[in-house]
Image (spheres, rainbow, N blue to C red):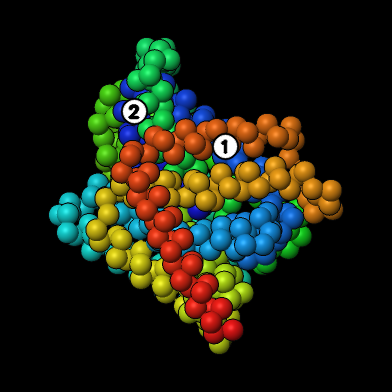
Amino acid sequence: MIDMVGIGPFISMSLIIGAMNGPACILAWILGAVLSLCDGMVWSELGAAYPEAGGSYVFLQKLYPGKWGKLFSFLYIWQTTLQAPLVIASGAIGFSSYLTYILPLEEWQKHVISGALVIAITLLLYRDIKTTGKMGVIMSIVVIGVLLWLIFAGFTHFDTQLAFGDFSKGINFSSVFFAGLGMASVKSMYSFLGYYNVCHLGGEIKNPSKNIPRSIIISILGIAILYLCMQTSVLGVLPWKEARDSKFVASLFFERIYGHQVALVATGLILLVAISSLFAVMLGYSRVLYAAAAEGNYFKVFAKVHPRLHIPHASILILGGIAFVFSLFFTLGDAIKAILAMRILVQFVSQAIGIVLLHRKKESHEILKFKMPFFPLPVVLAIGIWIYIYLATDLKFILGSLGVLGLGLIVFRVWRGNLSKIS
């Protein structure tokens, strides 16, 4: 849940309101929740069936046996080496941008702070998994506490006319409406991403066949309710045009109700939420790259384990290093679009298609420890909505994702060729 929240909803609310032209922005959050739940069913089945470190890296190999599985899993790891640092960098960039509510910063100062935060998170993860888990629980309490405070404040100062007065005006089912919904859904899905993080740690989870699906489904439902209540609370306190034009919607919200001093405290807690999310993201992805390298299916350096702490420290350091560079050069908006464009085809759509193929196998009843309700409807919905969002990320990001994919194919061919020569 701390992976899902982060700085995302606090910085994307104004963008979603603007894309949907008012209170109809609720529809983008609902669409994000529906997609997350449908796709979460796919992850639940796969996580329960294959509880190993690596998540999609493992799933794609299992779903597509032979050379196709090796290719898909390599392409996923190849893209993860770039998009995971982008996720980390986007959170750090969002942190430094939101910090300007408290401290006025020049653009170069924002990049310095975002880079410093990436370094700090990297150092924070240099400890054993049990200590990391305890820190995660404490961070979760802060995350949920901030959201509940915002929701409570909103509903105790709620103006129904302000929240829903212009709702119907933003819905006309025209091409412009669906284009706006697509752009808004890109932002809302950025805020939902992370519900599958437990699958990256599958090998470290007790009773995975039950706990992994529980973790995914409870996290999605819980966060979806919190997001919808949060957005509704904001609309009931701030005029939507004012919220649309603000870079600090949550802080402005607290300031309007409690005054500037309390808003500063709330902003500090929101920034702590952002740090918590970065902590969870880097923790999960470091295990993905490690799992691939440990099996000899990716570059060996990622398989190095710290002799005392028994953590994949090389993977953590490399992720942190690339994220540091990205945090210095990317803008937040471009990072969000690039993250989604890079992941949708190889990871989300390929897994959804693969789970359908798995269900058709005779031995599926032995493999699948958890089965989604209403199969294959959640899978069909997930694929359709993912493609819709992919097309809404802008042409340059679509072409960029295809370019990274093409380069990955070349690297795979050269790397596998070199391995065969060595063997």
The residue lying toward the viewer, choosing from 130 and 107, is 107
The residue lying toward the viewer, choosing from 106 and 187, is 187
Q: In terms of sequence position, does the residue under pointer 1 or pointer 2 come before the other? A: 2
Tell me the element at label 2: helix
Tell me the element at label 1: helix
Residue drawn at point x = 84 percent, y = 52 percent:
363
Q: Are marks 1 and 2 in contact (CB under 8 Å)?
A: no
Q: Kindly identify which numbered label has been placed on residue 198.
A: none
Give above or below for 271 relative to 42.
below
Give above or below for 371 relative to 326.
above
The amino acid pointed to by label 1 is Ile
Q: Return the residue at label 1.
A: 383
The quadrant in which the C terminus is found is bottom right
User: Disc 1 vs disc 2: which is toward the camera?
Assistant: 1
Q: Residue 25 falls in which quadrant of the image? A: top left
**Label 1 vs label 2: CA separation?**
23 Å
Q: Return the residue at label 2.
A: 19
The residue lying toward the viewer, choosing from 17 and 35, is 35
